[in-house]
Amino acid sequence: MNKFKSIIGGVALSVAIASSAIAAGVELNTTTTGLALQGYDPVAYFTEGAPTKGDWQITALHDDAMYRFANEENKAAFEANPEAYLPAYGGYCAFGAAMGFKFDGDPNYWKIVDNKLYLNLSEGIQQRWEGDIPGFIEQATVNWETIADKTPAELQEQ
């Protein structure tokens, strides 16, 4: 585990972490404008099976984060049941959460596992995460209980 923390710690120095909005005590990965998923449509991962940019004119606010959608149908599906489409760990990197850190989740490196959307930082990190998805999800879920309300910078100071 320390090996992974060292790797993640090193990555942290070279990664620009998105600023965040605080919502319901859980820090979400958003841009400085409060845009979630870098403007990608959260529903499209499930319906299209691919990252799809949302339309700036089709939006919904949820927990102080703005989500964009490719079409009105996706927006309606999200508004009817946002929890079904929200990315795990507030949109932060799933592997990073497993290591106890918060790194920007890249909407292009994703996977749906048990009907939950998971993002990762990069292709290399995604490949590592795919080496033990159940184990990393379990560890990230445990870690999330203590890191959910902390900013990425606070976690780097530890």
Image (tube, rainbow, N blue to C red):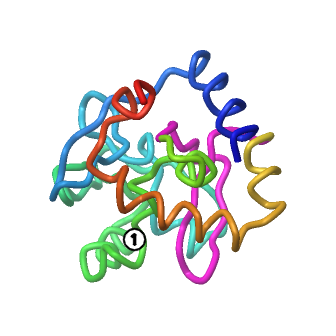
The answer to if 13 sits in the magenta stretch is no
Q: Determine whether, in the image, residue 29 is placed left or right of residue 58.
A: right
Q: Is residue 64 above or below residue 113?
A: above
Q: Position of residue 78 (x, y in %)?
A: 33, 73
Q: Position of residue 10 (x, y in %)?
A: 66, 22
Q: Position of residue 99 (x, y in %)?
A: 59, 47
Q: Using the image as rendered, state which of residue 12 and residue 146 is in the foreground.
A: 146
Which residue is located at x 42 percent, y 30 percent? 158
Q: Determine whether, in the image, residue 149 is placed left or right of residue 119.
A: left
Which residue is located at x 29 percent, y 55 percent? 58
Q: Position of residue 77 (x, y in %)?
A: 34, 79
Which residue is located at x 70 percent, y 69 percent? 135
Q: Amino acid at mark 1?
A: Asn
Q: Determine whether, in the image, residue 128 is placed left or right of residue 52.
A: right
Which residue is located at x 45 percent, y 27 percent? 156
Looking at the rendering, the stretch of residues picked out in magenta corresponds to 102-123
The answer to if 119 sits in the magenta stretch is yes
Q: Residues within 10 Å of mark 1 (few under 14, many from 20)?
A: many
* Quarter-of-image position of residue 15: top right
Q: Which residue is mark 1?
A: 74
Q: How many marks?
A: 1
Q: Mark 1 falls on what kind of element?
A: helix
Q: Using the image as rendered, state which of residue 85 and residue 17 is in the foreground.
A: 17
